[in-house]
Amino acid sequence: MSTKNLHLFNTFEKDGKKFARIPQNAIKCGAAPKYSDLVVQDKTDFNAIVEKLELYGLCVVKQYLEPSTCERIKKELEPHYFRHEEWNGSPFPKETTVVTRAALASPTCLDKMALDDMFYRISYHFLAESNVFWIGDGKLRRSDTDVQLYSSIIYRVGAGAGDQMYHREDMTLHNVHPRRENYHYGDDVQVGLAVALTPMNKTNGATRAIIGSHLWGPLDGPYEYDPDRELYLELEEGDGAFMLGTTYHAASANHSDADRIGAFFFMSKTYLRQEENYHVDMEPAFFENMPFKALKILGLHTSLPFLGHIGYRSPAFVLNPNLKEASQASKGNYSEVIYPVFE
């Protein structure tokens, strides 16, 4: 099995666990930015948003959506919130409920977020590619890629919810890049847009992020960093934030007595898919009695850690719940847990 980064970790086993020796190399990030450094007041200022994403991995845009639009979105989403009983801190606290595939559940989410022109322009700028290929007649042909909606999830963080663990959104796509001094185009495979559907602050569970972590390499984890670079996305209703998929972020504990609701949409590259579509013109009943092996090969099972899910469940197990008990592939989202030892 090939790897993009496992070979970089010096691993050993002790007492039945696997450990990895991690060198404590200082990350030189310069002076920590102030929150105001991340903020753009004009949602049409494309260049300012791009500049801040390159520098910080994050950009806050004031008044991205009208509060009335946020209220309409919340009304459309209300019947669709859910949680799974097995959630008890992983991936979300038990107090958190979600709406997945919100672009399908809320027409306003589709129109005002998934189809938003600035979201598309920013995503295209960071993710689109133009590549040249040889064809047998001796000519070169150039082909351009586009962007597609990767996820559209609403998080309702309830009172009493604890901190979520730091993570990069792009780990689902197994994206790995080296440590960078400056932003390098081609490193990102995702761009996100978050919108506060209720006020978000440090008290009620605002998303926190490590500014500049989009430049970190495989050995640079969210374990020892300048605390001044940890910022909370304190947003008023309708404020937005663009985020690169390489930025470490997490939801925070809700110490208030009310829900905190945020919409998080991500775009990815259009070639991150199968060449043939095996699903759209087939009735679900066609797949229901297929063995797990067939569903997996046809792209109807999640890729670890949790890519291609329906409501955080494998499509194979949605089609046939009995397969979950019979399949060893239902035993967790990760192949192995490795414990770091810092040296």
Image (cartoon, rainbow, N blue to C red):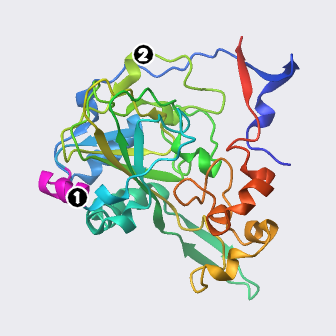
The location of residue 87, given as percent across then percent down, is: 54, 39
Q: Secondary structure at mark 1?
A: helix
Residue type pointed to by label 1: Lys
Near mark 2 (Cα within 10 A), the count class, few <14, some 14-19 or many ≥20, is few
Q: Is residue 20 visible?
A: yes
Numbered circle sitting on residue 227:
2
The location of residue 189, given as percent across then percent down, is: 54, 53
- The correct choice, above or below, for 301 with respect to 213 in the image is below
Q: To which residue does mark 1 refer?
A: 75
Among the 4 quarters of the image, the one containing residue 61: top left
Q: Are marks 2 and 1 in contact (CB under 8 Å)?
A: no
Residue type pointed to by label 2: Pro
Please tell me whether the stretch drawn in magenta is mainly helix, strand or loop: helix
Near mark 1 (Cα within 10 A), the count class, few <14, some 14-19 or many ≥20, is few
Q: Residue 92 colored magenta?
A: no
Of marks 2 and 1, which one's residue comes earlier in the chain? 1
Which one is in front in this view, the residue at disc 2 or the one at disc 1? 1
Q: Secondary structure at mark 2?
A: helix
Q: Is residue 343 left or right of residue 97?
A: right
Please give the name of the residue rendered at 49% of the width and 58% of the height, measured from the top-left corner.
Answer: 127
- The correct choice, above or below, for 251 with respect to 127 in the image is above
Q: Is residue 53 left or right of residue 294?
A: left
Per the rendered image, the range of residues in magenta is 64-75
The location of residue 339, given as percent across then percent down, is: 72, 22
Q: Is residue 251 left or right of residue 256?
A: right
Q: Residue 66 colored magenta?
A: yes
Front residue of this view, candidates 118 and 91: 91
Please give the name of the residue rendered at 69% of the width and 68% of the height, measured from the top-left corner.
Answer: 299
